[in-house]
Image (tube, rainbow, N blue to C red):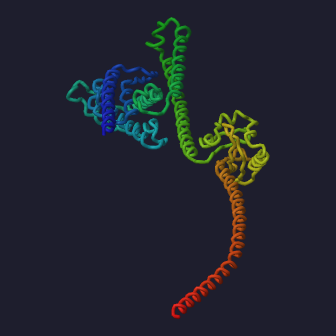
Amino acid sequence: MNEKNKAAGCVCSFQIKKILISVIFGLIGFWANFHAVNFMQFADFKVSILFGLLFPLFITLMWGWKFGLFSALAGGCQTMWWLWFTDGWGFLYAVPVFTLWIVWHGYWADYRKTHEHRWYASMYIVEIPFRIVIELGFLTLFRLLVSFNPPPWAPQLTNNFVSISWVAFVAIKHTITAYVLLLICDVFMHIAPIRKFFNPEEKTDYRETTYIISAAVLIGCAFWFIQGIMDYFVFYKGQSSFLDMMFVHVPLNSLFSRNLFLLITLLVGVILSRIQLQLRKKDLILQEKNRERDKILNSIVTGLNIYNVKKHMYEYINTEYTAITGWTLEDINSMGASFIELFHPEDRQQVMDHMAEVVHSTTDKVIMVSYRFKTKNKTWKWLISYDVPFERDRDGNVTRFLGSFIDMTENVEAHKELEKYKEHLEEMVENRTKELEKRNKELFEFNKLFQGREYRIKELRDKVKTLKQKLEKYGTEKKQN
């Protein structure tokens, strides 16, 4: 019960930690949204990204829609009430959709955690239907709300019309912003220390993806730095200071190319990271299956081995193999051709013929052989092996075969002991029979000897009895006279 209460306490503590971090991220996002970044700028329009949205978006992608909603309501998606008040009634639609955006991605983040990966559940794919619906709302509902301007809180706002071209511009801006933020979140989600902080119990290893993302960021920053140097010394020489040319007042064309290259490197980094992550997950699944296989094979009470015919080496032996013979896989493979010397000299040719029969077998039948095998402690054991082709190449040649063997030493020794006792018993029975026959013969002679004597003794007894009767009669007659 104490362990159960302790576990429940840990879960509750972690949930409180999530809520606090979500709120903190929301407040940071609230502040960051007041400092929009001019991400791309063209002749007719510019794309300014509210990077404060990154904080609730990252929370919702990591922990789901509930905590994402906490972060959005705590401020991450509320700055726009102050920024876009000039929209009048229109901001009643323009601002809440960002909170819905956070909840939408949080829902799909929860879905991905509990369901098998499907392409349509990708955060880049689920963004498409949401973006279509939201932008249709800007085309209809937002324009309708703006038509009611001015609002009571801002009577000076006289603009009550929104053109379709402006809505198209906003749709492009929102789409670019959304995918840039999703990409940046994706980058952070592939960095091991960040994953460890937000999901401390996660077992997936993100170290290799961290290296890939770090390389992508370094390449993007290197291009940014090289482009800045080229702008300062070549293309815009003398027009501005080095720091302005590098970070503050970046020329429009250069800003576009730098950000585009940075996005491309991040995108490539994320793609490579996802590929690496999938390979890693497949490797973990394979390792788990191998552990289950080894657990099953090691629980079998017979020795098992897999022999690679082309490499002339054993690829696998189970623990029972080592328990019976004492030899490990490394011991056997290090012997090379001398491994054949472990077989008894009288059995080697038989074993070699058996191996050749298995290798050249055209069927998958089990082939048996018995032999004596030298263990690591220099004793001989009687083994019976059952070998069968395990893998073939395209031409049907056996490339691997599976072998199993049983330790029959005790049975053989018991059989020999039984044969020994059997021979001894037969000898004892024969000697005893002769002795009994001799005794019977002696008894027969003895009985024969005494049979005549008993008859004569009986005659003498009868005569004595007769004489006794005569004497008694004679004595009686004499008394009467």
Query: Residue 333: x, y in percent?
Result: 69, 35
Query: Residue 150: x, y in percent?
Result: 24, 29
Residue 126 lies in quadrant? top left
Residue 165 lies in quadrant? top left
Depth order, front residue of 431/320: 431
Residue 381 sits above or below residue 206 on the image: below
Query: Residue 400: x, y in percent?
Result: 70, 44
Query: Residue 439: x, y in percent?
Result: 70, 67
Residue 457 sits above or below residue 125 on the image: below
Evaluate whether residue 72 shows in this view: no
Q: Given the current orientation, which residue lies at the most extreme top position? A: 238
Evaluate whether residue 178 shows in this view: yes
Q: Given the current orientation, which residue lies at the most extreme left position? A: 152
Left or right of 459, for residue 91: left
Residue drawn at x 53%, y 31% is 271
Residue drawn at x 68%, y 51% is 412
Q: Given the current orientation, which residue lies at the most extreme front position? A: 481
Residue 360 sits above or below residue 76 on the image: below
Q: Given the current orientation, which residue lies at the most extreme bottom position? A: 481
Left or right of 240, for residue 442: right
Residue drawn at x 78%, y 43% is 345
Depth order, front residue of 274/158: 274
Depth order, front residue of 420/476: 476
Which part of the image, by quadrant, shows the N terminus? top left
Depth order, front residue of 158/280: 280
Q: How many marks?
A: 0
